Amino acid sequence: MKRSLLWKIEEIVMKGLMIAATTLALGCLLLILAAVVWKGLPAMNMAMITQAPRGGYYTGAGGGILNAILGSLYLAMGATLVALLLGLPIALYLQVYANRSWLAGLVALSLDVLWGVPSIVYGAFGFGLMLFLGMRASLLGGIIALSLVELPIICRAVGEVLKMVPFELTESAYALGTTRLEVARKVIVRQALPGITSAVLLAFGRGIGDAASVLFTAGYTDHVPTSLLRPVASLPLAVFFQLATPFPAVQERAYASALALTAMVLVISVLSRLASNRLSKYVVK
Amino acid sequence: MIRHQAQIRVRDLNVRYGSLHVLQNLSVDIPANQITAIIGPSGCGKTTFLKSINRLIDLTDGARVSGEILVDGDSVLDPGADVTKIRQRIGLLAQRPYPLPMSIYDNVAFGPRIHGLCNGRSLDETVKHYLQVAGLWEEVRDRLNMPATQLSIGQQQRLCLARGLAVEPEVLLCDEPTSSLDPISAQHIEARLKEIKQRYTIVLVTHVLRQAERLADHVIFLYMGSLVESGPARDIFECPREQRTRAYVSGEIS
């Protein structure tokens, strides 16, 4: 057989495999979305997203999941903020100051391991810490545990983005007599801003969907959150509790809750993409 | 305008990257307020020499520098020297323009802002002044808030010149500043360098012999990391003392 024919076959087979893999990934997503919409939409109504559960909600009485929607938003926003405030300096330190040192390697390795730790472990760790400090399950506790889940994601994702900043750009900034801190703040962060936005979004999406880390630390309540020191509800746990009831009408509401969660992630993704596009106006390509 | 009398004296400069001995026992003087061209085949250490002068070489892993570089009598390589101060006094125009990720105005204002320089002028006037010196003002006066990356590459290089001069250096290092530009933009940069040489000590690395002939008052010829010959441009181009210089200038080696 001619070699060119072999190459052609190889090309077709590989391309086919790639298309199959992409279809599989896309198909899974679409199936999940379809199931959530299909089962959740009938139970979705204004009351679901504007009211907290009333008495007997879990046996089919009225009310909604506003408690969990707000709880999840507060938890994920708080945790993402904390993780960003800690993670951005870590990533900048590793990239700008401790570049390629053994310490940087060690920290990067630890972050990779932390990324792989199941979030229930963070929940248990956070719970242990709270017992030690005499705290009770609360929004604050949930934010702390969830920020531990998000920290490695933010650090690693931001770190990868910072690596993409061209060396010549930082060099030309240093050539103006700039200190490392000024280069980090005024040049590297600005250049990497769109990427940092994506990293934050990634962490937020992971955080808002996480059930295990907030199970012990944030607790659960039917009340709309009002204080950092009181327990809060979250959407993943709301889905779990409603799905675990024997009533089909309540199980349907679980899908409606999942629909609300998915819609929130979608809206936030779109918003941050828009923000990212605006921020990339000045970026040097 | 103050007339700077900066003069660079280099004594026994050695630079090694690991086991690679890039610059060997380089001793040379660079006169003030002239254009000094550093010529030589690629890989002879021109850029390394340039980056030693403003200590950008510190950013390169594994580079070891020894010897002495004096700018106006101040030691540059002294480990205790304030490297940001050195780089403020010694500007750089790089091979490819890299504008900062901000507007045209903010690019030029960057240096004056971080160093707190304005000499009593307002920031707007300072930015205008240096854009004029770089010959870019007329082209950008109506769009100062536009991202710098939207300029053409030739305009970007002039913006980088304005940005570098706004820091008020005494010395300007130019690392093949026209090699990534089209011929017209290259002419533009050359014309600006000629205009400003009375006020700055300019060190120009170039691999284009014709450019060195057009611009240089003084020439340093490096070959394989060592100094072969240095002197007034006319001497080097018209009656070089060394055989290797003659061969390079006439295009026999490159």
Image (cartoon, coloured by chain):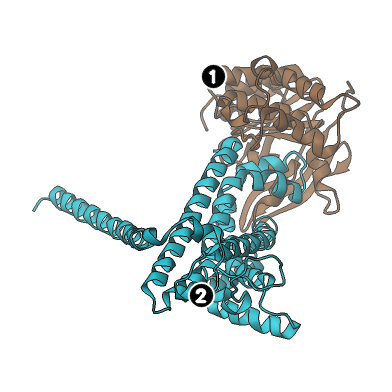
Of all residues shown, which one is farthest toward the top? B138
- Residue B183 is tagged as 1
Name the kind of residue labelled 1 in the image.
Pro
Q: Residue at x 56, y 36 (%)?
A: B41
> Which residue corresponds to the image point at 81% horizontal and 39% vertical from the top-left?
B114
Front position in the image: A200 or B179 = A200
Residue under label 2: A56
Element class at badge 1: helix
Q: Nearer the viewer, mark 2 or mark 1?
A: 2
Left/right placement of residue B80 relative to residue A251 reads: right
| Most distant residue in the left direction | A1
User: What hue represents chain A?
Assistant: cyan
Report crowding for label 1: few under 14, some 14 to 19, many 20 or more residues within 10 A (C-alpha).
few
Q: Is residue A45 visible?
A: yes
Q: Is residue A47 above or below residue B188?
A: below
Chain B, colour shown:
brown
